[in-house]
Image: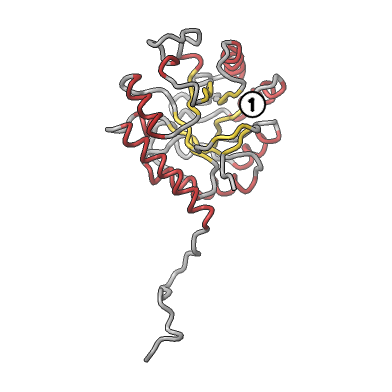
Amino acid sequence: MSDNLVIAGKEFRSRLILGTGKYKDFETMRAAHEASGTEMVTVAVRRIDIHDRSKESLLGHIDTERIMLLPNTAGCYTAEDAIRYARLGREAGLSDFVKLEVIGDEKTLFPDNEALLQATRVLVKEGFIVLPYTNDDPVVCKKLEQAGAAAVMPLGAPIGSGLGIQNPNNIRIIVESVSVPVIVDAGVGTASDAAIAMELGADGVLMNTGVAGARDPVAMARAMKLAVEAGRLAFKAGRIPKKLYASASSPLEGMLV
């Protein structure tokens, strides 16, 4: 049976989503995308020339035959700004999908959940497929689903921190609470972080700095690919229960004396 990631009816074989910022050059970015096997990458609408598709532009270095663009509203601090940049991205022909970000605090870059809900409701009514970046708050994630979000993207840790999954129980509760895909976004620093996110039941992982900021981004991209695949397989296989005391691998019953 297929185990593809499905968001708003669109299927993706890869459950790893990458960003396009912070790479030392476009060639490294493209090579990392290839090594990761990703089929979706984020592009910040307000930080690129969305009309420039030349080979010298960011968009000119993304294999759009294989990889879908996911415009995001990074850098927006109000619902109004986020809505405006989502519209600009669609008008430029990037996508009906949008990774919705409304930042509430300049230092921590934590989301403004009230503004996020407001923007989600507006964009859903306009036909956008909204993937909101939010806190790891099960109540907020449920409200975003009710507002029409096609997926929810709770943070694992603050953006770019590399701290890994700080509240695994919250991620697990979110997975149990909503019926839309859960994609852990932000805070992944290395492959084990990605594997843990998937073992918790997340449907996918989105990262940028964890790959782009690595000493060898291309090697890290491949490591993240394998980690996401391994974590997903482990989640489906079902881990053994944790026990306080030892349990013999070879039971004493039936042993020859």
Total count of labels: 1
Q: Position of residue 34 (x, y in %)?
A: 39, 30
Pointer 1: residues within 10 angstroms few (<14), some, or many (20+)? many
Looking at the rendered image, the quarter that the C terminus falls into is bottom left
Asked whether 107 or 195 is in front, the reply is: 195
Q: Where is residue 138 drawn, in percent x and y?
A: 61, 42
Foreground residue, 17 or 54? 54
Residue found at x 49% / y 30%: 39
Q: Residue at x 51, y 52 (%)?
A: 235
Q: Which residue lies at the image location 57% right of the left edge and 11% below the top edge?
A: 92
Residue 107 in the image: x percent, y percent? 43, 26
Q: Residue 153: name its quadrant.
A: top right
Task: Judge by depth and name the residue closer to the eye, 131 or 233.
Answer: 233
Residue matched to label 1: 129
Q: Amino acid at mark 1?
A: Ile
Residue projecting furthest to the bottom: 257
Q: Say what secondary structure mark 1 lies in.
A: strand
Is the image coloured rainbow, by chain, by secondary structure, or in one colour? secondary structure
In the figure, 148 relative to 201: above or below?
above
